[in-house]
Amino acid sequence: QVQLVESGGGLVQTGGSLRLSCAASGRIVSISVMGWYRQAPGKQREAVAAVSSGGSTNYADSVKGRFTISRDNTKNTVYLQMNSLKPEDTAVYYCHARVAPPWYDDYWGQGTQVTVAS
């Protein structure tokens, strides 16, 4: 089994910064994609950013230029540096990883709350 443990959420003022971390542990041979999703109250979960094992990144348009995703493959850890935070970034942020073996399967963290005060 695989576990994803997130940390780094909290309360911040508009314009502030936070850094989220997510460490994967357990029976891991390979992780293809790692990323972050978020879900605000009353809204569907949406993709925020993702990074491949080779370092290619993708971002939602709403966070481009403000958020940076990175990954440490030696630690099976993904980070999300969030700058210039806005109240609309308020949500529960979930870590995601696609992990093998025996085949690639999707795993999720428990979620961490990010609240941006106006």
Image (tube, rainbow, N blue to C red):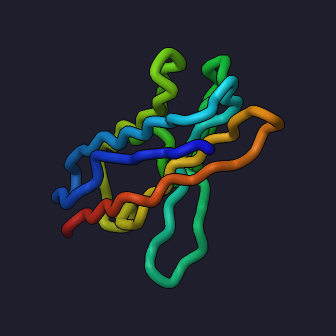
Q: What residue appears at the point 40 percent right and 66 percent down from the top-left corner?
A: 91
Q: In screen coordinates, is 58 left or right of 78?
A: right
Q: Quadrant of the N terminus?
A: top right
Q: Quadrant of the C terminus?
A: bottom left
Q: Is residue 55 visible?
A: yes
Q: What residue appears at the point 35 percent right and 66 percent down from the top-left corner?
A: 90
Image coordinates for residue 6, horizontal then vertical, percent: 39, 47
Q: What residue appears at the point 43 percent right and 59 percent down from the top-left corner?
A: 111
Q: Is residue 68 visible?
A: no
Image coordinates for residue 68, horizontal then vertical, percent: 44, 34
Image coordinates for residue 109, horizontal then vertical, percent: 50, 53
Which picture quadrant has residue 116?
Answer: bottom left
Image coordinates for residue 56, horizontal then vertical, percent: 65, 24
The correct choice, above or below, for 115 with respect to 109 in the image is below
The correct choice, above or below, for 77 with respect to 19 in the image is above
Q: In screen coordinates, is 64 left or right of 14?
A: right
Residue lying farthest to the right in this orientation: 103
Q: What residue appears at the point 69 percent right and 36 percent down from the top-left corner?
A: 99
Q: Nearer the viewer, residue 45 or 74?
A: 74
Residue lying farthest to the bottom in this orientation: 42
Q: In screen coordinates, is 82 left or right of 15?
A: right
Number of residue marks: 0
The correct choice, above or below, for 60 with respect to 25 in the image is below
